[in-house]
Amino acid sequence: MRNHITARRAERGWTQADLARRAGVSRQTINAIETGKFDPSLPLAFRLAKLFEQRIEELFLDEC
Amino acid sequence: MQVVSELKATGLLALGTFGWTATIALARFGPGLLWETSNQVASWGAVALNVVAGFGWIVTFIRYLRAVDELERKIMLDALAVTLGVAWVAGFAYVVAHAADLVASELDVAALSVLMAVVFVGTIGVSKFRYR
């Protein structure tokens, strides 16, 4: 699933490790989500959207 | 919060794994080394201890899976699925090969366990590299 996490993270000057700590996951998880190798669970997707003060559908793109 | 929980769960899993392995060694080498082979009560006690420790290890592993990060959980579940599949395929292939007199010796459970361990660790390594 494509997403805007890399761009939103860069806007805030956060590293992957920074975002991982705030979201309560590992840096590898953030990297895997950003590169589209791993789709997050719904709770984690909501947590990320909340961190970036965006709606979930603004952060994650529906490819269907 | 989650890091502490993960660390705690990982530590408990390591302890559980060590404890279970120790009870295997006790049940395997205890008779003859620590007590007489004829002392079946002690031998059965060691086997029972191993089974109890084994169930404890299963519970610890489930708690570990629930505590870890969701990508780590996916990596573990994938590795478990591959390991179970390989064990079934290899195990049944060996059994039918033995039944057809293609191989002389019967299936060695210890060898199958080693194969499962190698596949499990190898699959985790491949997944970790993929998601690095």
Image: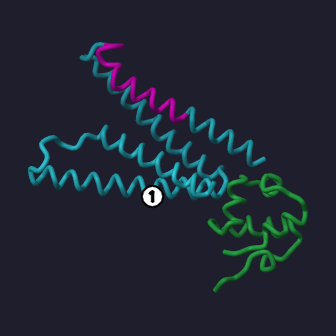
Task: Using the image, determine if residue A33 lies above or below residue B28.
Answer: below
Taking the image as shown, residue B63 lies to the left or right of residue B37, namely right
Q: Which residue is at 71% across, 52% downward?
A: A26
The picture quadrant where one finds residue B43 is top left
Q: Which residue is at 62% across, 52% downward?
A: B66
Task: Using the image, determine if residue B114 lies above or below residue B38.
Answer: below
Dot 1 alpha-carbon crowd within 10 angstroms: few under 14, some 14 to 19, many 20 or more: some
Taking the image as shown, residue B130 lies to the left or right of residue A19, namely left
Percent x, y for residue B102? Answer: 11, 50
In the rendered structure, the residue with mark 1 lies on which chain? B
Q: Please name the residue that numbered disc 1 is placed on.
A: B81
Which chain is cyan in the rendering? B
Of B20 and A61, the residue lying toward us: A61
The picture quadrant where one finds residue B86 is bottom left
Of B72 and B61, the residue lying toward us: B72
The residue positioned farthest toward the left in the image shown: B101
Q: Which residue is at 33% across, 13% downward?
A: B33
Magenta residue span: B16-35
Percent x, y for residue B73? Answer: 59, 55
Which chain is green in the rendering? A
Q: Amino acid at mark 1?
A: Ala
Could you tell me which secondary element the residue under label 1 belongs to?
Answer: helix
Q: Which residue is at 74% across, 45% downward?
A: B3
